[in-house]
Image (spheres, grey):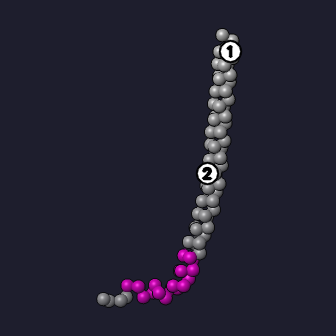
Amino acid sequence: CAHEADSEANWARYNAEVVTKMSDAEEAKQRMIAEENHVQREILTQQKEELDNRKAEIKKEGIAEIGSEFFTRFGQSCR
C-alpha cells in the first residue's frame, strides 16, 4: 500500500527531525553550562585574589598596630 509507505516515511522523517532537534538542544545546553562554569571560575579566582590581598593587608596592619613593645614583655609575668 503506497499510502502506508508514505505515512511510515513521513513518520520516520518527523522522528529523525525530533531526535536531531533534541540533540541540538542538548548540545546547546551543555555549551551554555560550560560557559557559565567558566565565568563562575573566573569570578571565584578574582574573589580569592581579593580575599588574599585583604588578608595580607589586615595582617600587615595588625602587626604594625601591635608594635614591638607588646612582645618585649612576653614570658616575664608571673601568675
User: What element does badge 1 sit on?
Assistant: helix
Residue 24: image location, x then y, percent: 67, 36
Number of other residues with Cα within 10 Å of mark 1, as a class: few under 14, some 14 to 19, many 20 or more = few
Residue 67 disc label? none
- Looking at marks 1 and 2 on the same chain, the residue that comes earlier in the sequence is marked by 1
Over which residues does the magenta segment extend?
A: 58-75
Residue 27 figure quarter: top right
Residue farthest along the left direction in this orientation = 79
Q: Which residue is drawn at the image coordinates 65% and 31% (left, top)?
A: 18
Picture quarter with the C terminus: bottom left
Residue 34: image location, x then y, percent: 63, 47
**Depth check: 46 or 72 in front?**
46
Label 1 sits on residue: 3
**Depth check: 37 or 52 in front?**
37
The three-letter code of the residue at mark 1 reads: His
Q: Which residue is drawn at the image coordinates 60% and 70% (left, top)?
A: 53
**Depth check: 24 or 7 in front?**
7
Residue 37: image location, x then y, percent: 61, 51
Q: Is 66 colored magenta in this rendering?
A: yes
What secondary structure characterizes most of the magenta part? helix
Residue 49 figure quarter: bottom right
Q: Which residue is drawn at the image coordinates 51% and 85% (left, top)?
A: 66
In the image, is residue 61 above or below residue 25? Answer: below
**Depth check: 70 or 45 in front?**
45
Label 2 sits on residue: 37
Number of other residues with Cα within 10 Å of mark 2, as a class: few under 14, some 14 to 19, many 20 or more = few
Q: Which residue is drawn at the image coordinates 68% and 22% (left, top)?
A: 10
Q: CA distance from mark 1 to mark 2?
A: 51 Å
Picture quarter with the N terminus: top right
User: What element does badge 2 sit on?
Assistant: helix
Residue 76 figure quarter: bottom left
The three-letter code of the residue at mark 2 reads: Asn
